[in-house]
Amino acid sequence: MTEQTSPPVAACPRCREPVDGHRFCESCGHDLWLRRGGAARAAAGPCPACGTTAATGSGEEHRAGGLDAAGEDYCGTCGLRLPDGTDHIEADLGEVAGVSDRGLWHVRNEDAMALGILAAPDAPAVVAAVVCDGVSTVEDPETASRAGADVALERLLHPSAPTMENAVEAAAAAVAELGEDHVRNPPSCTLVAAVVRPHEDGTGVRVTVGWVGDSRAYWLTPPDAPEPARLLTVDHSWAVEMIAAGAMDAAAALADPRAHAITRWLGAGGEPQADVEMMDFTGPGLLLLCSDGLWNYVPGAAELAELALPVLARGGPAAVARALTSVALDAGGRDNITVVAVPVELPNEATMDRRST
């Protein structure tokens, strides 16, 4: 017979007082999780097309910009849909940091990220991160990515420790609800999420990654590390499925105009079932989550590691997220770019035991 032990009591990372699953610590008021790098939206500023300065505001409910009769944010002079203050967001929680940027070609940022930490007394923190990429061909894709990221993070950081599958299901339901107001072309998005927690035997950490669509997770290590840098996810895309089925070789599939069409997504008409992997690490590395705005320019794990790890050594995860975002912008910035970095610092040699759930 095995003994049933109680899980550690969750504690505020600032004051170390016990917390009960709410977003804010009742003792010191500390925000226990961070939505998209910050709940408030910055002022929209002038219209990027005609220069007209719109009325500005901030906060979740008061969106900046000149509103038309339908309640959307459009320039009253030229009719362009205005940026909503999420063009560039940075979040740095120490153990995890991220940057989300509009890029150079899109009118607004349709990506979203959500980062959070939950600490237990006298134990390392549990870190969770989510990246969502709105599908640009639907209405209001940014609402899908923000809802998906927020709900997934809230579930992943709950003290009851729900599974990754539960978190993705909740995110999918939240995105599906948005379709009630967008009957013709409802919002949808991709999702990649990760949770890093201390391993039960105390030898390292367990990383759980779940994804729907083509947003990616990477494990980055130096070239001489026992466990090489690698891509941890497999894109749910047309090209990948054609190659896996043996219907086309890689060169032909990737050259096809349908190559990057996703085959799973959160939202109406999609298959929201996540693939989930659990990995045990006993050595140092960098967990990286990103949207295709980065990996379209730098798809290889070894190349990402070469770019990211020197920056991590000098400046931490926030510097990594900024640097990789700059790489994508310098390469053309044709899509929204979101990069989240989670450093894993452990004393032992890196090994990984991969298993599917």
Image (spheres, grey):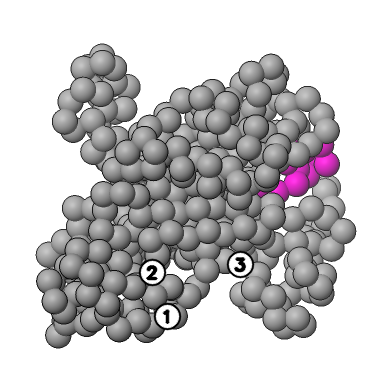
Res. 233 in view? yes
Q: Residue at x 41, y 35 (%)?
A: 295
Residue 293 drawn at (x, y percent): 37, 42
Q: Amino acid at mark 1?
A: Ser
Q: CA distance from mark 1 to mark 3?
A: 20 Å
Q: Label 2 to label 3, Cα distance in Å?
A: 20 Å
Q: Picture coordinates of residue 115 (x, y %)?
A: 57, 58
Find residue 258 and report its horizontal and vertical position in percent.
18, 33
Furthest-front residue in this view: 51
Proximity of marks 2 and 1: CB atoms separated by less than 8 Å: yes
Q: Earlier in the sequence, mark 2 or mark 3?
A: 3
Check residue 33 in the rendering and tell me which mark sits there, or answer none.
3
Q: Taking the image as drawn, is residue 166 in sight?
A: no
- Residues shaded magenta: 195-205
Q: Secondary structure at mark 3?
A: strand
Left/right of residue 218 with respect to residue 189 in the rendered view = right
Q: Quadrant of residue 308?
A: top right
Q: Is residue 131 left or right of residue 145?
A: right
Q: Nearer the viewer, residue 347 or 185?
A: 347
Measured in 3D between alpha carbons, the distance from the residue under mark 2 to the one under mark 1, in whole angstroms, is: 8 Å
The amino acid type of the residue labelled 2 equals Gly
Reading the image, the residue beneath label 2 is: 85
Mark 3 residue crowding within 10 angstroms, few (<14) / some (14–19) / many (20+): many
Question: Residue at point 46% right, 25% down?
Answer: 300
